[in-house]
Amino acid sequence: MSTSDKELQDAFKRSQQVQKQNDGMSEKANARIRERVLAYNKAIESDSGIKRVFAATAANIRAYFASSTLRFTAVAFAIVAMLGVYNIGTFQRNHSSPLQTAAHRVDIVQYHGFEGEDKLLAGKAGTDYKARFNAYTQQYLESNLVARAVTLEPATLTAQNGYWLLVSCKNQQVVVSENLIASLNINGRIEGDINIGTHVALAFDAQGRILSIKQSSKPLMC
Amino acid sequence: MSIGASLQSLFQGKREKVLGVSERLMLRYSAKGDEASLAALFDLHSHKLFYFLKVLSDSTVAEDMCQRTWIKVIENRHLFKSGDNFQAWLFTIGRRTLIDEFRKNAKLEFNNEAVESFSLSELLKNAQSSVEDDVAKGIEKDVFKACIQQLPYKQKEALSLQFEGFSLAEIATICSAEKETIKTRIRYAKDSLKTMLEKL
């Protein structure tokens, strides 16, 4: 390296130092990156730790069930358990006290609302929560997950007391919270003049969440 | 202890002596995933990596790329082998991450091989303007940075790596180019840089 090359090298090092002094942002950026990188490492490590525990447990279980006698016992237990679950289901179905409406006998109630909104409403006197709910709905509706509705169900609006109570052909009672109604409205997901007795089409996504409520031109066909 | 085991530990000891601090830290991190080793590696190399990426882009992009590079180090730690140079490995990941980002955003600066892409007067004008920006911001002016940033992408990349202490062979590996090509890039870069520094 000639002298002039050496000078260039020194100038480079000096420049690095000047940058360090000049750019307080660089130092802050470096500190931020450090924090995030170490947090990521921690998360990866704890995740792989859990996987190791699961792998060890699975290996133990596999070893435990290796004997044919235990395998037979496990199959027998599974059959008994399945029968038990079926009986419990039947019992509930026969003994539940279904709600009666003018047109439908209702067995199942679904509640659609924002998770934890009760707590939010209790804690907030202002309208801040509404903005949060609307932002959530908009974000959710715009996300790639919501490409299209996977199921459409006809229903009738039977009550409008802040929340909406809709009854479907499958005797499902669908309660839609006031805030979800407001958010769907703001995002243009409620179409038509919907009043009590109006037939509607409910669109659900793959997770069973309501995407839209539209006034149905056809009467409820059950 | 048997003679075989003694010989083995002796060889291992010699092998460890050859390894640098960073390489030993990385091997330990690769085996244990411990935070202390990673933090030490970060403190040793992150500032240099950040400066390298900043010369090739800007502060915002450099921050993002620097973080992504370290995330890749974590995720690919098992790929680091004994005998590898840690800093060369790190800078290779950093360089590729930055190029991927440029490609994603359709920025083609990194393809700029042409030496005469800008006239000297244009380069000087740009450098002068960068220095004036520093003065206007009330910070110490950095003529060298202003000049090196005017160089074509591949030239400043090769030159920055040489200033960081990498050998020609290492730079060739990092940049996936022939040694002779790297030599030429560095020569052109130095000539342009010297001319600019003299004129400013």
Image (spheres, coloured by chain):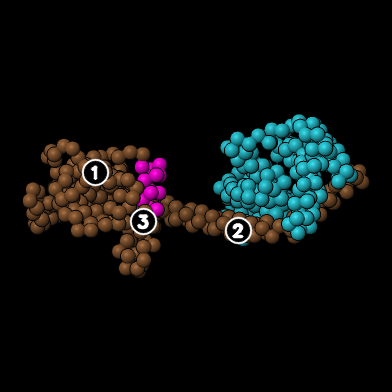
Chain colours: A brown, B cyan
Q: CA distance from mark 1 to mark 3?
A: 22 Å
Output the chain of dot 3. Answer: A
Q: Where's residue B17, x and y in %?
A: 75, 53
Which span is picked out in magenta?
Answer: A135-146
Q: Amino acid at mark 2?
A: Arg
User: Which residue is label 2 attached to?
Assistant: A32
Output the chain of dot 2. Answer: A
- Of the two numbered discs 2 and 1 on the same chain, state the one appearing first in sequence: 2
Q: Dot 3, how many residues are within 10 Å of its Cα: few (below 14), some (14-19), or many (20+)?
A: some
Q: Where's residue B170, x and y in %?
A: 75, 40
Depth check, mark 2 against mark 3: the one in front is 3
User: Which residue is label 3 attached to?
Assistant: A133
User: Which residue is label 1 attached to?
Assistant: A192
Magenta segment: does it hold B160? no
Magenta segment: does it hold A142? yes
As drawn, B182 above or below A63: above
Q: Residue at x 18, y 37 (%)?
A: A217
